[in-house]
Image (cartoon, rainbow, N blue to C red):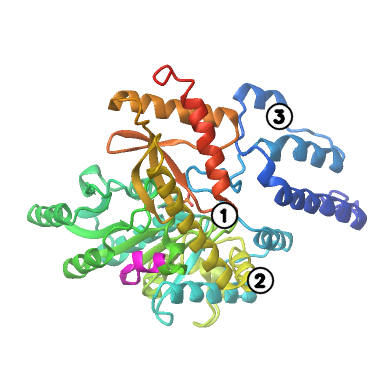
Amino acid sequence: MKKNTATLQLSKEEMRAYGYQVVDAVVEHFETQNEKLPVAKASRAEMDHLFLEEAPENATDAKQVLDFVLKEVVTQSTIVSHPKAFSFVPGPSNYISAMADTLATGFNIFSGGWAASPAAAELEVVTLNWLLKIFGFPVKKGGGIFTSGGSLANLTAIVTARRIKCGDDFSNAAIYLSDQAHSSNIKAIRILGFRKEQIRIIPTNTEFKFSINKLKNAIAKDRLEGLKPFCLIATAGTTNTGTVDPLTEIAAICKKENIWFHIDGAYGGAAILSKDGKKMLKGIEKADSLTVDPHKWFYQPYEMGCLLVRNIAHLKGTFTETPEYLKDVEGNKSEINFYDHGIQLTRRFRALKFYMSIKTFGLKEFREAITYNIKLAEEVEDCLRTSPYWEVISPATLAVVNFRYNPISHKLNEKQLDELNQYISEKVVATQEALLVTTILHGQTVLRMCLINPRTTMDDIKETFKLCNEIAKTHKLIQ
Ligand SMILES: Cc1ncc(COP(=O)(O)O)c(C=O)c1O
């Protein structure tokens, strides 16, 4: 047979030159990102014009493809690590973890089972133990798994809750979450095939927290109607306002009612590393399962979510399968196969970036960065309160603050304020200088800042407010 030359390989020199160019581009990005415009804007037609083509049958020079990608692809994305990327949940990231991801991909480490990669499995155990300890979960009995993100961690938790509390019959099972719970939870519930009548969305109070009274009523009524309350999802740091549900009270209800207590701490969980955050998150240690999302406020690049559980037997009991083709690699009990803890068999080596960045910077630097973020949001709140143009709608909570433009010189009604603030957001985004979008709180259109970037300064905020003021003055309601 003719020797195969289709090996998808480059020469050593070509690989080096290519790799150096990639690293140079990433370093340049880290060095200059603060000065770039954070917002990417391009229409489908423009993108089609640039990229749309048939899969090429023949080769193109590697450098040419890379140059094209560096020029046209990576430049056409919102810089979520930019100090003025205030919206959604930004992704501040860090260089060590970006390089760790490059290593994990470069070596293509299979992080599914012990037999294939004992060091990868061990580092996942070690880093999960760090997190278990940080969140006050039992380290010996507890455990967890790294996932692609918070959505997958929430899905993994709800499947586990259902398996443990309901077994195979969940036809009359009921699940509880608040109207401020993240949409990924509802998505997960839908994926799992629950009917609408099995899902209870409990209204929140004026502070956007789970209404305990309404929750108790709902559980009691469901029991009277023959339903089986099996899982409750509380949020530790809601996406809209950073609010933490009354975790200790909810934990007591779940215990009394034999309901699985899941906490979605995807956004706010990391705040436990700061003194104030730890106080606010009191009760988080009582959950049966907890989602945290290292690719948010633990400053990791995408994709990295995490599910922690109080009792690892619950994850194993839900996800372990023993097909004949894996029997030779099962190993002994102490050798952990993460494919038995979750949905994926083949998994990338996510633990590496968490391990390398925490080792390199030390937890102390993470604590200081998170504390800075919380204080910065509080300073922003103060600045808004003392301004004649702005009003605070939801106070700084775990680095999130919501506000609106409402100048004391103009007596505007609710409808006008909604219109004006929507206008400000759209025009700010159109300048590409800051990513500042709206959300809706109690029916009001408000501007929201999520301040988890440790490189964001008060100057960045003041420049953004100045821009907003200038834009507001161009609206007919203000002229
Ligand atoms: C509270 C909360 N839960 C879950 C998620 C979903 O996480 P991911 O986007 O990593 O899937 C988010 C995302 O913003 C979130 O804020």
Which residue is at a point 55% across and 66% down the rendered structure image? 366
The image quadrant that residue 164 belongs to is: bottom left
Placement of 165 over or under 312, stated as above or below: above
Q: Of all residues shown, which one is farthest toward the left? A: 224
**Label 3 vs 1, first from the N-terminus:** 3
Q: Indicate if the residue with disc 2 has its beta carbon within 8 Å of ligand 1.
A: no
Q: Are marks 3 and 1 in contact (CB under 8 Å)?
A: no
Assign a secondary structure to mark 2. Answer: helix
Residue 302 appearing in the image: yes
Question: Which residue corresponds to mark 1?
Answer: 303
- Crowdedness near tag 3: few (<14), some (14–19) or many (≥20) residues, C-alpha within 10 Å: few
Expressed as whole percent of the image width and height from the top left, the position of residue 2 reads 91, 51
* Residue highlighted by disc 3: 51
Image location of residue 377, percent across then percent down: 45, 52
- Real-space Cα distance between discs 3 and 1? 25 Å
In the picture, the disc for residue 196 is: none
Name which of mark 2 and mark 1 comes first in the sequence.
1
Amino acid type, mark 2 = Thr
Horizontal arrangement in the rendering, residue 274 relative to residue 111 (left or right): left
In 3D space, how far apart are the residues under numbered discs 2 and 1 (Cα atoms)? 20 Å
Tag 3: amino acid: Phe
Horizontal placement of 61 versus 396: left or right? right
- Dominant SS of magenta comes to helix
Q: Is residue 164 magenta?
A: no
| Residue span colored magenta | 276-287
Q: Position of residue 198 (x, y in %)?
A: 22, 49
